[in-house]
Image: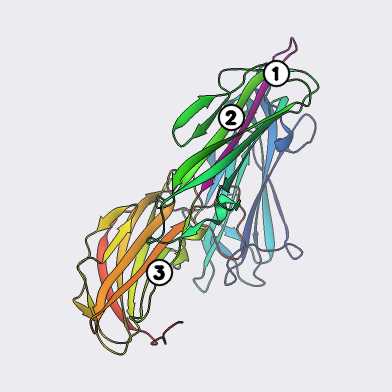
Amino acid sequence: MQFSSALIALFSCAFLTPSVLADCPVSADIKCTVDKNGLDCAELLRDRSNCFEPVTYVYEYCNYQESDDVTLLENAELIVYTTSVDFATSTIPAGQCIEQTYETEVDTCQGSFHSSLKVAGKNSDDDYCYAYKFLKTEPRPPCKVSADVECTVVEDGSDCADIETTPETCGDIDVKYDYEFCNLNFEKVNLNAQTFYKIDDTKTSIDLSPMDVDECRGFERTVTVDTCKYQFATALKVEGTLDVEAYNYCYGYKYLKSIPSKNVYDPAPCMVTADVTCTVPGADNMECASVVSNPESCNVEVEFTYTLCNNNDGEVLISDRTKAKSKNVIIGFEYSDSIASGMCEDYVERIVINTCYSDFRASIAFNGSYEGETCYAYKFYSESPLEMDTPATSSPSYSPSAPSPSKGMKTKSPVTPKTKGI
């Protein structure tokens, strides 16, 4: 790809708002405009008669510290369309913003195109400075059709997103999917064979007769789903052309995923707890919920910490039925035989997750006994990586290259005993 030389500007950032890391506040932003009309690139149409469109990218990165410069690290990255380019400077001066402008040509027929800016550096106090912006642009087809899906529980009409259950109560339930798609054009739309709905992995064709102007079609399907599974999903795809001589591609798509919430089950009289946390090693213990899914670097090493705590007045014996899982695979930890009163044990596993295809999922089931009473606690952890165009707010987003996984660390720590019922 060829693009013009960068235009670089330096200006004060006193009136702008930093997005991340209070100890070293920096920001990253990208804007894309269409050269021929000055409109935002989000207004581009997918025109197969003329796929290539000249655009201008403006990259802005700022240092909000009043008196401390930021030195960029090697993992700082600026990507124009498909090409990585150098930063204009190795240092961002205190209280200043730097702009780099590039003119290039994008292919509007490939479905989407993107660009990214990762600001990673250190200040004089060795604080980590981080901000990330990913700009994804999807040129719209000249033909507009909509696709929508809703899911409700048959028994009570509640939204499938609100399903809550436990390992003891999960099982089969009936849900209803409501599908609707509409022709939003001033011409008739001719649907093709790529119009279908999909439940899990099964595709089913629907009515392909031409759609009149402003026509909407809807239908429903009732299916049985297993809430013990991690998730269940459906999708609706609408594809066709306008009823005119000129080629106009019509496309609409909706994907709906439902993830039942697995609540902690912690019965009395034996008071034990189980917990799972997920952090990114080497990123100030940032939570996995702040990880950005990056197609350029899908694999991310994370650290699951499984914690078992005894809140009773005496020792709790640990059963060999105590199991920890990540990605539905049992982890072979060597548990202690018992946990003393008021103590916790941590078991740590490092694992590589492909964030382009997987969520962060882990669970632990604590089985044991206390004075002849059965002890049980369960925790299911699930977080999805952030979409790349989701801006960072109170904490940094992170998408590192992944080193080799390791597992098996164990630590002990005291805990304040809980009273029954808390």
Q: Give the residue pinned by disc 1.
A: 248
> Which of the 4 quarters of the picture holds residue 369?
bottom left
Task: Tell me: residue 17, above or below residue 318.
Answer: above
Q: Is residue 341 left or right of residue 255?
A: left
Observer-side mark, 3 or 2, equals 3
Task: Tell me: residue 265, above or below residue 357.
Answer: below
**Does 239 lie within the magenta span?**
no
Front residue of 268/146: it is 268
Q: Is residue 338 left or right of residue 112?
A: left
SS majority, magenta:
strand
Distance of label 1 from label 2 (alpha carbons)? 17 Å
Observer-side mark, 1 or 3, equals 3
Q: In the current view of this chain or complex, which residue is farthest to the front?
A: 155
Q: Give the residue pinned by disc 2.
A: 237
Front residue of 268/381: it is 268
> Which of the 4 quarters of the picture holds residue 67?
bottom right
Q: Earlier in the sequence, mark 1 or mark 3?
A: 1
Residue positioned 71% across, 63% down in the render: 17
Specify start and end residues of the magenta stretch as a single range.
243-258
Residue type at the position of mark 2:
Lys
Front residue of 27/110: it is 110
Query: Looking at the rendered structure, which numbered label has been put on residue 239?
Result: none
Residue type at the position of mark 1:
Asn
Residue type at the position of mark 3:
Tyr
- Residue 299 seen in the current view: yes
Distance of label 1 from label 3 (alpha carbons)? 55 Å
Residue 377, horizontal then vertical, whole percent = 35, 71
Q: Give the residue pinned by disc 3.
A: 265
